[in-house]
Image (cartoon, rainbow, N blue to C red):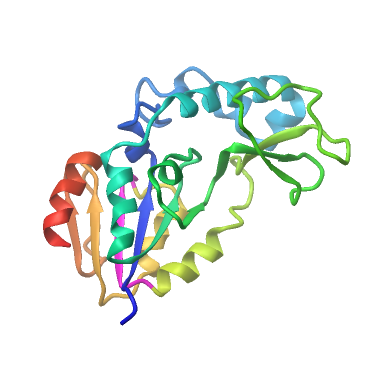
């Protein structure tokens, strides 16, 4: 008998409990840096050195962080389910916790790519990238990140995966950032859906949804009872 297909959709809230600053909360990184200056194609064109430095800072933060109980919980579900993680996060904490199938919607902080050829992607083992670090075609390496104003290439892939789900869990995302927030609406009406987030949401239009009003780590402990 084949395993049920379980989709786990995660946002900044799950990484926050590993000490990675979120960007929309007070005290988050966007208070120290303007989005327009560090996370847009225009910013890269204007000041690649500043953008590179910003992502070096973020990369070091990710490398210093450790997966938390929620990351490990979703990895452990692979014994029972066919688990696909879809994440808005650019960190590698799901992978480090042991999740085998992780789709990153907004890119990966531990990778860089050619600024001319988006198909030339390289894994990093260190946190620092310098101006002058180039791909084999001679172009400067840029963060492998989907910046504001850029297309989300994995969005269609994610939607196709979600349509085949037998169970849908979303954790630590405000469901305000589109197009990613619309993924829960792509899931079949008939399947069970769980939302783990301490916030309040208008989600009456989503069928079979249980809202667990907890942060990620406390929320997965409650979720375990339902699964």
Q: Residue furthest right?
A: 138
Q: Which residue is at 59% across, 25% downward?
A: 127
The picture quadrant where one finds residue 45 is top right
The percent coordinates of residue 152 (x first, y second) are 58, 53
Q: Is residue 223 visible?
A: yes
Q: Is residue 204 magenta?
A: no
Mark count: 0
| Along the viewing direction, whichever of 179 and 161 lies nearer the viewer | 161
| Along the viewing direction, whichever of 192 and 227 lies nearer the viewer | 227
Q: Which residue is at 72% across, 41% downward?
A: 113
Q: Which residue is at 54% across, 65% downward?
A: 157
The percent coordinates of residue 101 (x first, y second) are 46, 58
As drawn, is 6 to the left or to the right of 215? Answer: right
Q: Which residue is at 61% across, 26% downward?
A: 126
The picture quadrant where one finds residue 114 is top right
As drawn, is 42 to the left or to the right of 74? Answer: right
Instruction: Give the residues in magenta.
Output: 165-174
Q: Is residue 171 magenta?
A: yes
The picture quadrant where one finds residue 22 is top left
The percent coordinates of residue 200 (x first, y second) are 21, 45
């Amino acid at each position: 008998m084949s395993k049920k297909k379980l989709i786990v959709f995660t946002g900044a809230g799950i990484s926050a409990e590993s000490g990675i600053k979120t960007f929309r909360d007070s005290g988050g990184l966007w208070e120290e840096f303007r989005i327009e200056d560090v996370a847009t194609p225009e910013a890269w064109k204007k000041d690649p050195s500043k953008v590179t430095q910003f992502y070096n800072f973020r990369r070091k933060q990710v490398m210093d962080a450790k997966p938390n109980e929620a990351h490990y919980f979703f990895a452990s579900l692979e014994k029972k389910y066919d688990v696909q993680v879809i994440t808005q996060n650019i960190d590698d904490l799901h992978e480090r916790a042991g999740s085998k199938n992780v789709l990153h919607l907004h890119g990966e902080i531990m990778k860089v790519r050619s600024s001319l050829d988006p198909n030339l992607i390289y894994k990093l083992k260190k946190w620092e990238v310098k101006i002058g670090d180039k791909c084999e075609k001679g172009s400067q390496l840029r963060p492998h990140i989907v910046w504001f104003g850029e297309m989300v290439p994995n969005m269609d892939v994610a939607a196709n995966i979600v349509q085949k789900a037998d169970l849908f869990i979303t954790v630590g995302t405000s469901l305000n950032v589109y197009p990613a927030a619309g993924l829960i609406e792509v899931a079949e009406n008939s399947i069970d859906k769980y939302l783990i987030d301490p916030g309040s949401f208008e989600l009456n239009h989503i069928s079979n949804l249980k809202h667990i009003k907890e942060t990620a780590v406390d929320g997965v402990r409650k979720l375990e009872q339902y699964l």
